[in-house]
Amino acid sequence: MNMHTLNNNRPHYLNPYFGGVLLGLLVLLTVFITGRGLGASGAVKSAVVTTAEVVNQDQAKANAYMGKFISDDISPMNNWLVFETFGLFLGGLLSGILFGRLKKPRVEHSPGISRKTRLIFALLGGALFGIGSQFGRGCTSGAALSGSATFSFGGVIVMLTIFGSAYVFAWFARKLWI
Amino acid sequence: MGPLIPNGFIPGDWNFVIALLLGIAFGFILEASGFSSSRNIVGVFYGYNFVVLRVFFTAVIVAMVGLIYFDYFGWLDLSQIFILPTYLAPMITGGVIMGLGFILGGFCPGTSFTAIAIGKMDGLVFTIGLYLGIFAFSLGYPLYSDFYNSGDMGNVTLMDVTGISSQWFAFGFVVIALSAFWVTMLIEKRVRKRITEYKF
């Protein structure tokens, strides 16, 4: 691939500082309207609790963790973060359509690894992120971004440990990416 | 005045409509900034693309400074907003686990949803992993429930912990962010010269 085709295929992304200003204003607006920030992992937790409840309600209620999020009146899916996350998906779709990035299903991976390797590590990484976000009381959105922006001590701790540890682990995982 | 919904300026019925609209804006910004690509995201850890640092840090300082102004103008009562509680040791542990998940999986939860939206199967598999991880965490919870609930400091802010004012913290974050933008710009220029197989 020569430089010419590289430039022609160049994806059109927002200027990152402009994107950052928009994201910062969105966090500000969200806090101004709702009194709390944005999130993402919470919706997956709601999905987990809901499926467990549908499959076996008694066992789900008996689980010391899931039981905290189950009530008799409302479904765990009846939750602010679930609606917000559905919007998140739609917003991504809208941007993908607008900028021409919505394409047929594909796997993005470094040329140095196979699709299968990429998918195995995506699964593993997702599982670790899921576990970590429960201990961290939120993920990059809820804890690191919204938490830090609202001056939460824990939010800053999560931000520093996510990025700090990823830099340390990056050396060991370099074959996956470069 | 603010926050608007808790103070009754917007009826609670609108809560989920607003959630959907704010979510759409969130997803749009993440995708449009390039976060639907794992190779864009991890570039921050290998020096070839610092888009994550630029977007993330800019967002944090804009929101921080904005909150201080909103409070100053009396538009938003900062004592009424939700402060994420701090559980020190569990949160450090969680952050390290997430850091490992980040570098192996190439996404975080929010970005993986936008990746699915444009057809990336690696994003879908990451989200399946998230689901399985949270499920596994719930099943094993009795084993570490004591640890999970340890180090509870309550809903503390940086100001509560240090006694330094929010203005100084916002100023400090702005200085750190601007320095980081400048340093990483230099690093990126050098690293990109060596990388040929990645579309910027």
Image: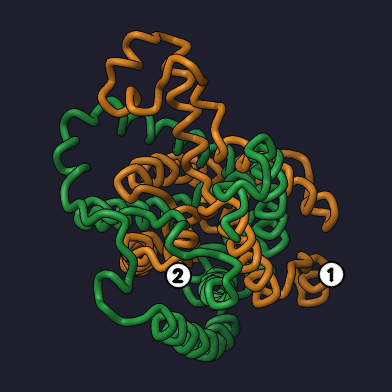
Chain colours: A orange, B green
Using the rendered image of the protein, determine whether residue B142 is visible from the camera's viewpoint.
yes
Q: How many marks?
A: 2
Using the rendered image of the protein, determine whether residue A169 is visible from the camera's viewpoint.
no
**x, y (%) of residue B128?**
50, 33
Judging depth in this view, the residue of B142 and B169 nearest the camera is B169
Image side of residue B63 versus residue A161, left or right: right
Judging depth in this view, the residue of A73 and B115 nearest the camera is A73
Q: Is residue B122 above or below residue A5?
A: above
Q: Is residue A12 above or below residue B18?
A: below
Where residue B164 sits, quadrant-wise, is bottom left
Q: Give the letter of the chain under mark 2.
A: B
Mark linked to residue B125: none
Q: Amino acid at mark 1?
A: Asn
- Mark 1: give few (<14), some (14-19) or many (20+) Cα within 10 Å: few
Q: Amino acid at mark 2?
A: Phe
Judging depth in this view, the residue of B91 and A71 nearest the camera is A71
Q: What's the CA distance linking mark 1 and mark 2?
A: 26 Å
**x, y (%) of residue A146?**
49, 60
Q: Circle 2 sits on which residue?
A: B45
Residue visible at 32% across and 71% down in the picture: B158
Mark linked to residue A8: 1
Q: Are dots 1 and 2 on a single chain?
A: no
Q: Is residue B96 above or below residue A58?
A: below
Q: Quadrant of the N terminus of chain B?
A: bottom right
Judging depth in this view, the residue of A169 and B28 nearest the camera is B28
Q: Give the letter of the chain under mark 1.
A: A
Residue visible at 19% across and 55% down in the picture: B89
**Between tags 1 and 2, which lies in front?**
2
Q: Secondary structure at mark 1?
A: helix
**x, y (%) of residue B178?**
52, 88
Residue visible at 71% across and 39% down in the picture: B17
